[in-house]
Image (cartoon, helix red, strand yellow):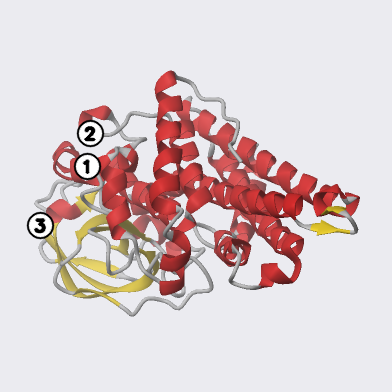
Amino acid sequence: MPVERELPTPEARDLLAMTREVADAELAPRVAADERAERFPRDLFAQLGELGLMGLPFGEDVGGGGQPYAVYLQVVEELAMRWASVALGLSVHTLSAFAVDHFGRPAQRDDWLPAMVSGQWLGAYCLSEAHAGSDPSALAARAVPDQHPSGEPDDPPHAWTANGAKAWVTHGGLADFYTMFLRTSDDGGRGISCFHVPAGTPGLVASRPEDKMGMTASPTATMNLDDARLDGHLLIGRPGQGLPIALAALDSGRLGVSAVAVGLAQSALDHAVTYARSRETFGKAIIEHQGLAFLLADMAAAVESARATYLHAARLRDAGRPYARQASIAKLVATDAAMRVTTDAVQVFGGAGYTRDVPVERLMREAKVMQIFEGSNQIQRMVIARDLARS
């Protein structure tokens, strides 16, 4: 069912209308077959790029759409209502380009951002490691300078040699560039630096993609570094600035995940309502039985509450105000809601909901990972509680 949206401009309303039209025509007909075949829809990202959807929150000076984050996220949500893997891919791509957009030197922004925001390049974000997922300060993958700086404190080395492995990389092995966080000194969280690593870099190799419960059209793989050579100009920001860059990016990325989760939950709700209107028991549609009607009402309340939560955080971001706690709240609320709503949608369908003949079975499997990636929901509770303690 169409979502009632409050949008700031006629341009934004037209953008959402176009997104719905494209998603219905290009994403919805393919999602079931491609997810079952574990087939990555790379062509769709190129198409979204041609339509300007891959660079919506980036500045017009680099070819982006110049849209508020609250508008961009509603585009992500509309895509997720048809295909969560594609919406997640857009969110991860935006997360990957964040470092260059906010911390890159002018030459880096000029050279790399136009290809990123146009969708010519598809990005991946490489922070987690097998033993350092929720604790990025414990990263072990390392980049060692080949040559010492000239003596200026902010002058980066001329080149680096990188070794190690980055785990759980969305688009791993298929991305065109990797925003990668590597240890460059032993100074704990202050010893991590951020690099732009192009695909095809010698020594950068993807492992076999993970066999996942859901979102199987979105490849996830470990990226291995074996004496990978990184030129000095690939360093983003200053040496040792990587962790602040990573955490700033994740605040925005958590809003992207929130929008994906809400879109997924809205889809599950729509399927459940449609089925409940058409399925009859004891002489009337099952939606007219109070037990089921109240279940659907709770599902609708969860979806709309989650949407309001992520939009509140996005509007704080757009206003230039602190929003880290609100981003964690949005991620927590939206992904927990998605898990609950998709589980209840399976219940509405009864036995049929447990089969792959109906979409809600897939949606339930896809919802689970959203409580885990980009900071598990247990980590979000820690972030929220620490912020409250400081307030």
Which image quarter is the C terminus in? top right
Query: Is residue 284 rendered to the left or right of residue 388?
Result: right
Identify the secondary structure beneath mark 3. loop
Residue at (40, 62) in percent of width and height? 188
Mark 3: give few (<14), some (14-19) or many (20+) Cα within 10 Å.
Answer: some
Residue 62: x percent and y percent? 21, 33
Callout 3 amino acid: His
- Distance from disc 2 to disc 1, alpha carbons, whole Å, reads 8 Å
Q: Nearer the viewer, mark 2 or mark 1?
A: 2
Q: Which SS class for mark 1?
A: helix
How far across and how far down the image is residue 369, in percent? 55, 64
Pointer 2 or 3: first along the chain: 2
Q: Is residue 129 visible?
A: yes
Q: Nearer the viewer, residue 15 or 145?
A: 15
* Figure check: 76 above or below 374: above
Which of the pair 83/253 is nearer the observer? 83
Residue drawn 63% across and 54% down?
268
* Dot 2 and dot 1 residues touching (CB under 8 Å): yes
Task: Quadrant for residue 340, please give it.
Answer: bottom right
Amino acid at pointer 1 = Leu
Q: Which mark is residue 63?
A: 2
